[in-house]
Image (cartoon, rainbow, N blue to C red):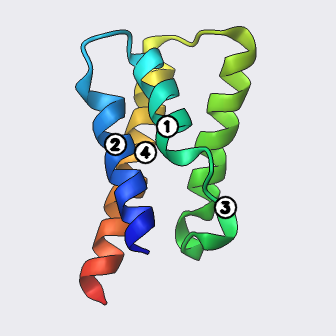
Amino acid sequence: MTDLLNKFSEAAKAATSSKTNLWECVKRAFADHLNDINTDSLPEEIKIFYDSVKLRVKSAEVFGYIDNDEACYIANDIMYLADVISSGLRKS
């Protein structure tokens, strides 16, 4: 679970910290930190959110670009996932 926390925390930072194009930040955050996550290793309550993020990132890669609104929604979902993982560890 700690590995998941690190991955999602780093992805959340990467998705929101750069001053470049938001879509590029989100795409890089997913590729660098979240792409190799096995859905089976996730808590049940966030599997659908992770699958949604993965599908949206992978689908957008086909077109090469998405607008900042959608990139912002994906970045927010990544931050939500990091928060859920983090709060789950604190409760344990």
Dot 3 falls on a residue whose secondary structure is loop
* Residue type marked 1: Asp
9 sits to left or right of 43: left
Between circles 1 and 4, the one closer to the viewer is 1
Q: Amino acid at mark 2?
A: Ala
Residue beneath label 4, please? Answer: 78
Looking at the image, is mark 1 or mark 4 earlier in the sequence? 1
Q: Which residue is mark 2?
A: 12
For the residues labelled 1 and 4, the Cα–Cα distance comes to 13 Å
Q: Position of residue 5 (x, y in %)?
A: 37, 63
Marks 1 and 2: which is nearer the front? 1
In the depicted view, which residue is nearer to us: 40 or 76? 40
Cα separation, mark 3 vs mark 1, equals 14 Å
Task: Between label 3 and label 4, give the one nearer the viewer.
Answer: 3
Q: Please tell me how crowded label 2 is: few (under 14), some (14-19), or many (20+) other residues with Cα within 10 Å.
A: many
Farthest residue to the bottom: give it: 92
Earlier residue among tags 4 and 2: 2
Q: Which residue is mark 1?
A: 32
What numbered label is drawn on residue 38? 3
